[in-house]
């Protein structure tokens, strides 16, 4: 329990606070509309569907206010670098921004479903009440006409026997905007599923921009003021006394004709702040889009990996950060995230792009067809943005785990380490690094092996062979690979990478690896960093909890994962 609190305590606290606010808003507004005297006559028409429609609306307002904030990348980078979030534990929460974004989206989807079903029942019951199917009181309330010049004192929005529930939904502001909002939400949620996002990123990207329509509809949704409450009159209308004698309304002093009005729309007040912040975010992206970017070098690596070395005036980065790239020749709207593989000490920044999806395939084909010495297509860059890997030098010991192309943030880190050793940087706090790379194909090691060879040589020359411990794992192979490895087993260098450290076949035994790190660093704080699949993340997170010691004098593991 102590280890769990260390690793997940603050995340759990934030989640409990968020859920608590949702529950409070739901219960408070449910009771407000279910027991409020100003809605007694409204409940006569709509019954329990009234609080079941309005309580989710309050929760929706709160979550629609939150949904944009986790995807404001510049805001998160500002917070990450500010004194407010200087603590390691707080910065870890910023790295879970997309997880929180999804949680808020799930809550919006759930509350939208409840809100929609309740209002569909309301449309039915408004119509039935006007037709006198629910007794004389509901019928009289529905027949109340406008008694003011503003024509707004009625209770039932249905004003004709020819009005059907369907007609009410598609001819009112609340109904039309509700249909548009719901359709936009359904498309955004379905296109966000893992299988679509991974295989058809463009579908996810374009449909997610329906959020513009979603928020526009949200702002105008309450303008129709379709849910109405009783107003105070002079003399006051005594509901408990008058509800049984609607025929005397307007005849007795205690029973003046009741007056009704719709509530003032509030949704826009909840979402206007985040909308302005996000608008500034997009404006900054446009400014960066217009800034010139030039190519320093273009390299096609094996396994269909494209390396781009780019130069942009005034560009400054930190290790492990990522950028969004846009290629107008492919699409002026699509931006894709890529971790930078260069070090801050270099006068350029580089990315390695693997061919997955239409956008990356089109870019690689475009580069392959360039004439000798030709410049690449125009590229726009947004960023850099902070990630968990930025904190790698804050730990005494770091475990870096990369899967496939997920090695890219650690390329930046290892390059930066090489520069720090070269320049004898006194600020380097890190005492030891354990690096694990898992790959399916042998040629995937090629582009990164050169860097490891340089580091290997540098560590030997400085007598610091123990500073960097790296292990490479080939997770996909056939019998010919095994036979070849057995024949050349006695060689000093690995037959795949040319490194002194031999490549292992299969997957790491993480229990063995964590136990080794703990024994070799009995009193250190170990940062475990992963850029890889979710299944591996869950496994490593459990190991961090399992092998951490509550005693502050002993080894503690902190898990960090890259999120895009």
Image (cartoon, rainbow, N blue to C red):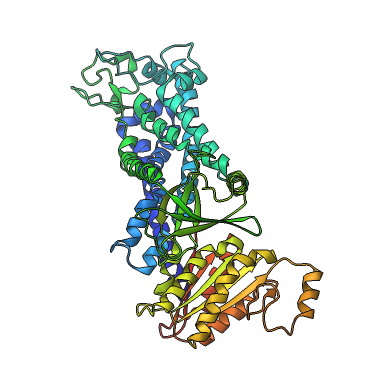
From where the camera sits, is residue 134 visible? Answer: no
User: In screen coordinates, is 147 left or right of 369?
Assistant: left
Q: Position of residue 34 (x, y in %)?
A: 38, 37
**Quadrant of res 475:** bottom right
Q: Position of residue 186 (x, y in %)?
A: 54, 37
In the current view of this chain or complex, which residue is farthest to the bottom?
Answer: 463
User: In screen coordinates, is 306 left or right of 285?
Assistant: right
Q: Position of residue 332 (x, y in %)?
A: 48, 38
Q: Position of residue 512 (x, y in %)?
A: 62, 80
Asked if residue 46 is positioned above or below residue 348 in the image, the reply reads: above
Looking at the image, which residue is at 56% across and 65% down? 407
How many numbered circles does the render carry?
0
User: In screen coordinates, is 248 left or right of 404?
Assistant: left
In the current view of this chain or complex, which residue is farthest to the left?
Answer: 234
Looking at the image, which residue is at 44% across and 30% down? 47
In the foreground, 435 or 547? 435
């Amino acid at each position: 329990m102590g280890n769990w609190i260390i690793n997940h305590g603050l995340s759990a606290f934030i989640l409990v606070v968020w859920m608590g606010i949702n529950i409070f808003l739901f219960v408070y507004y449910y009771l407000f509309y279910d027991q409020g005297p100003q809605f007694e006559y409204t409940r006569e028409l709509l019954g329990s569907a009234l609080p079941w429609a309005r309580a989710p609306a309050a929760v929706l307002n709160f979550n629609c206010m939150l949904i944009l904030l986790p995807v404001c990348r510049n805001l998160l980078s500002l917070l990450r670098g500010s004194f407010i979030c200087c603590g390691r534990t707080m910065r870890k929460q910023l790295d879970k921004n997309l997880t929180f974004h999804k949680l808020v989206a799930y809550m919006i989807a759930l509350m939208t479903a409840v809100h929609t079903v309740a209002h569909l029942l309301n449309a039915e019951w408004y119509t039935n009440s006007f037709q006198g199917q629910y007794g004389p009181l509901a019928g009289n309330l529905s027949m109340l006409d406008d008694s003011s010049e503003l024509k707004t004192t009625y209770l039932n929005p249905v004003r004709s026997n020819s009005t059907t529930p369907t007609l009410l939904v598609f001819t009112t502001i609340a109904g039309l905007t509700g249909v548009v909002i719901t359709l936009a939400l359904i498309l955004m949620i379905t296109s966000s599923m893992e299988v679509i996002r991974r295989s058809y990123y463009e579908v996810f990207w374009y449909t997610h921009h329906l959020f513009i329509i979603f928020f526009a509809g949200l702002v105008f949704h309450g303008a129709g003021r379709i849910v109405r409450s009783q107003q105070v009159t002079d003399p006051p209308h005594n509901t408990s006394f008058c509800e049984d004698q609607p025929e005397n309304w307007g005849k007795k002093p205690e029973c003046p004709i009741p007056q009704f009005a719709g509530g003032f729309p509030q949704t826009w007040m909840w979402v206007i702040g985040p909308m302005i912040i996000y608008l500034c975010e997009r404006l900054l992206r446009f400014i960066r889009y217009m800034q010139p970017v030039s190519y320093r070098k273009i390299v096609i690596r094996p396994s269909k990996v494209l390396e781009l070395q780019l130069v942009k005036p005034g560009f400054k980065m930190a290790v492990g950060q990522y950028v969004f790239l846009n290629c107008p020749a492919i699409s002026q709207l699509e931006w894709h995230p890529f971790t930078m593989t260069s070090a801050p000490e270099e006068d350029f920044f580089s990315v390695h792009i693997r061919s997955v999806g239409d956008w990356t395939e089109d870019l690689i084909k475009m580069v392959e067809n360039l004439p000798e010495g030709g410049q690449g297509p125009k590229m726009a860059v947004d960023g850099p943005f902070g990630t968990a890997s930025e904190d790698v030098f804050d730990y005494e010991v770091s475990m870096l785990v990369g899967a496939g192309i997920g090695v890219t943030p650690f390329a930046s880190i290892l390059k930066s380490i090489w520069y720090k050793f070269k320049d004898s940087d006194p600020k380097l706090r890190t005492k030891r690094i354990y690096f694990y790379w898992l790959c399916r194909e042998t040629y995937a090691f090629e582009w990164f092996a050169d860097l490891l060879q340089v580091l290997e040589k540098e560590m030997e020359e400085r007598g610091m062979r123990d500073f960097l411990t790296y292990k490479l794992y080939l997770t996909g192979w056939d019998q010919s690979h095994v036979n070849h490895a057995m024949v050349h087993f006695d060689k000093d260098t690995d037959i795949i990478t040319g490194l002194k450290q031999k490549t292992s076949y299969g997957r790491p035994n993480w229990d063995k690896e964590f136990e080794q790190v703990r024994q070799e660093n009995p009193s250190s704080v170990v940062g475990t960093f992963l850029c890889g699949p979710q299944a591996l993340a869950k496994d490593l997170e459990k190991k961090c909890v399992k092998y951490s010691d509550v005693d502050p004098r002993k080894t503690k593991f902190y898990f960090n994962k890259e999120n895009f």
